[in-house]
Image (tube, grey):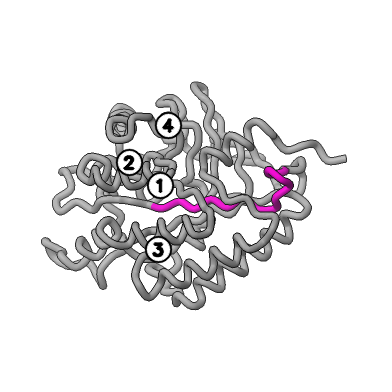
Amino acid sequence: MPGQRRYGMDHEHYDWSPISTRGILRWPNDSRVALCVIVSLDKMEWIPPEGSYQAGNLAGGSAVRPFPDYTRMSHREYGHRVGIFRVLDVLEKHGITPTVAMDALTAQNYPYLVQHCLDRGCEIIGHGISVSRMITSNMSEDDEKGYISQSIAALKQATGAAPRGWMGPEYGESYRTPQLLAEAGIKYVCDWANDEQPYPMKSPTGEITALPVMWELDDVGAMANRKVTVHRYCDLLKESFDRLYQDGAVNGRLLGLSLHPWLTGQPFRIGYLDDALGYMTGHSQVWPASGEAIIDWFRQNPPAAKD
């Protein structure tokens, strides 16, 4: 779907919609902010298959090293072995239902983690095959369909149910990904960082909705890539929430927060996450919810027209 020069959007994925002209979105119990925390469990492969694409700036370790890059691989595996349990404990403490983005290799090779997430009431959504195999437009349509199908099948086999949501590894998509996700039965996608409310996307087959995340608050984007200190990151979370809470008094807002246990689950960072989430959930008009719950509410209670 190549870009087109025209009025409005230059693609067919969704309509142009400035938030100042929209109807009023109300969350349950008249909450001002819906808080969705997405926790990524993504597997880094030692030797990705030939022809696969891994982001050149993939975080982990101190720098990219020659194979085998033990530092980066083991740094990231820390999330599966230690960090995930700290992060889930903090979310449970503050009454937040986690949305766990789990890739196929994690689902297949870490059955204990799958069961642990299910036992704690997490929603598990699709997250591709591995962080070493990112979706790009270099894939053929058939290859991308097979990739999506393999990811969904792995989660269905591991959890007993097909995922309703999707977050691509490293936010990776091709120009046709939303439509292929909808065709495969996915109901919402978290790769688009362009809004503070969910919005419908276009698809000739199936129904799909964008659940936007705040990319600049993604822990990897902030602390690993932009080198924001953990002290400042905690402040960014609180300051962002404050503004969303203020604006949400007029029209409901969404704070989609993407976290990675190998990074935020470190012992010197977890307390700052605890502090920030405690601050958010300490407000009376905040709705901590899974991605599935947020999208279901949005679809069943669309924004009301302004008076």
* Residue picked out by circle 3: 220
Q: Amino acid at mark 4?
A: Leu
Pointer 4 residue: 181
Neighbours of disc 1 within 10 Å: few (<14), some (14-19), many (20+): few
Tell me how far mark 1 sits from mark 2, CA to CA: 22 Å
First reached walking from the N terminus: tag 3 or tag 1: 1
Q: Give residue 248's position: percent from left, percent from top.
A: 72, 54
Rounded to the nearest angstrom, the CA distance separating label 4 from label 2 is 11 Å
Q: Is residue 119 positioned above or below 201 on the image?
A: below
Name the residue located 50 percent from the left edge and 57 percent from the top edge.
215
Question: N-terminal of the two: label 1 or label 2?
Answer: 1
**Mark 2 element type:** loop
* Quadrant in the picture for residue 160: top left
Residue receiving disc 2: 128
Q: Is residue 176 visible?
A: no
The numbered mark, 3 or 2, whose residue comes first in the sequence reads: 2
Q: CA distance from mark 3 to mark 1?
A: 24 Å
Mark 1 against mark 2, which lies toward the viewer?
1
Query: Which contiguous range is marked in magenta?
Result: 26-39
- Residue type at numbered disc 3: Val
Which marked residue is nearer to the observer: mark 3 or mark 1? 1
Query: What's the mark number on residue 120?
Result: 1
Element carrying mark 1? loop
Say which amino acid is labelled 2.
Gly
Question: Based on the displayed image, in which of its 4 quarters is residue 221 positioned?
Answer: bottom left
Q: How many numbered badges does the structure rendering display?
A: 4
Decide whether residue 31 is among the magenta residues.
Answer: yes
Q: Indicate which disc, 4 or 1, sits on the residue closer to the N terminus.
A: 1
